[in-house]
Image (cartoon, rainbow, N blue to C red):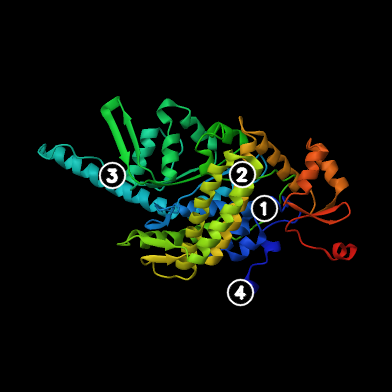
Amino acid sequence: MNPKQEPQTEEIFWVPGAAENTELNFDDSVFEMIPECLRPLFIVASNKQERDVILLGAITILSGCLPNVYGIYDNRIVYPNLFAFIDAPAGAGKGILNFVRYLASPIHKAKREESKILQQEYELKMIAKRKEKDNQEGFVPPPPCKMLLIPANNSASSFLHTLSENNGAGILFSTEADTLSNSLSQDWGNFSDVLRCAFHHETVEIQRKTNKEYISLESPKLTVFLTGTQGQLKRLIPDAENGLFSRFMYYSMRSVPKFRDVFERRGTIPGQEFMQLGQQIFILYELLNRLGTPLECHLEKSLQVEFQNKFASLLESYFNDTGDRILASLHRTGLICYRITMVLSCLRLFIDQRATPSQSLQLNQSDFNVAMSLAKHLISNSAKHMAEMPGVNNDIIKYRKLQFMIEMLPDTFTRKEANEIGEGLEISLATLTRYLSSDAFERIGHGKYRKKGAQHSDNELMSN
């Protein structure tokens, strides 16, 4: 991949100065490594955080559009399906995420059209039976209701029935998380356990006394993409002990105190780039659906070792900083990282390179690197959200304060600047001293510090 052919990110991806806290944003290198087919999508973004959520949203939605693709993780068969929650206050620009729905729309529309035809055929058959007074065949079941994008305002049995009629696969998509929260709060709609099982493709069963209803679904392949406010997130997942918490990827958008140019045209037709990629995904979906043997994804041995080493290091670091509450999220972030790699490698091979799907796929190293970079942000975001939930331990709350401090400090800073920020966050001087001696910072002179990973400036080098 030739970096000289990359789009000019400063012109396409964001307006300088808006939502530019790089500690909160995905690394720029991620956008240099992603598959080519995803890059046109960022033309609609006006800042880095919009660029980030478009990437996370696209990966999530596309994870539900890859049938017959699987891998072996922790000695279990896993599919690409991901869960994501984007939380944002008013004015943060989350409305841009409506575009990601276009990526799955062609598949959804084709399924709805198929369902419409089947229903028409069913009705004609029933009319003919009534005319002929043909009762010999007995009850004729109605045709399945085919769809890919499943509404969030469902009862548990209706939701599971819809999944069952679609071979256990679907995308739960809602830009207002309260829609799902309201369903989960009802006795008839409590399918939080369905979501928890579906994340790991575990068998889901529901039995109701009414009509003696019994539904069983083996190996569900469910994708969930939700957006909402932090308050909506807390209503959906009230505490960190809820097993649903650790199954989601999180990204927090921030309000941008700037009135955007509402007449600026980014792209020719709004959402056109998403529609075009959606048409390519539809073709890929059809190809994968027709595979006689499912396609298995493999990670080469050297990347397996790297994966193990990096997650072992992350686990040790987070456990030391926050205690054992974070472990469930960290373990599942490993699975999420593997699934992201699967999604990206499928796009690279089958969309960018136009390869024909076969029985095996070697996961790409660039896609692995992207997934690992995203994973570090995702587990950090999980820890931040966990710190805001009731019943968490003091270590997680302290970790949250440390993350706030890191975000507020410039790349290079003085002890005086750190003291001022620490005072605002109610961090004691002793705790601040301990933070500054942690792996997050390095001392570069008397009373001078730098964030780990920050670029060295010429002035700084000369002063040392």
Which sits earlier in the primary sequence, circle 4 or circle 1? 4
Q: Name the residue under label 4.
A: 2
Q: Which of marks 1 and 2 is in front?
A: 2
Which sits earlier in the primary sequence, circle 3 or circle 1? 1
Question: Is residue 241 rendered to the left or right of residue 425?
Answer: left
Identified at 71% across, 45% down, the residue is 403
- Local packing at callout 1 (Cα closer than 10 Å; few below 14, some 14-19, many 20+) is many
Which sits earlier in the primary sequence, circle 3 or circle 2? 3
Which sits earlier in the primary sequence, circle 4 or circle 3? 4
Task: Say if residue 399 shows up in the picture.
Answer: yes
Q: Which amino acid does label 3 sit on?
A: Gln
Which sits earlier in the primary sequence, circle 1 or circle 2? 1
Report how far apart the C-alphas of labels 3 and 2 lie in the structure.
Answer: 55 Å
Q: Nearer the viewer, mark 4 or mark 3?
A: 4
Identified at 78% across, 37% down, the residue is 425
Question: Could you tell me residue 368's position as x and y percent?
Answer: 54, 61
Q: Which amino acid does label 1 sit on?
A: Asn
Q: Which of marks 3 and 2 is in front?
A: 2
Report how far apart the C-alphas of labels 1 and 2 lie in the structure.
Answer: 24 Å
Identified at 31% across, 61% down, the residue is 293
Q: Mark 1 points at which residue?
A: 25
Report how far apart the C-alphas of labels 2 and 4 lie in the structure.
Answer: 40 Å
Q: What residue type is labelled 2?
A: Phe
- Local packing at callout 2 (Cα closer than 10 Å; few below 14, some 14-19, many 20+) is some
- Local packing at callout 4 (Cα closer than 10 Å; few below 14, some 14-19, many 20+) is few
* In contact (CB < 8 Å): disc 4 and disc 1: no
Question: Could you tell me residue 168's position as x and y percent?
Answer: 35, 46
Label annotation for residue 319: 2
Q: Quadrant of residue 458?
A: bottom right
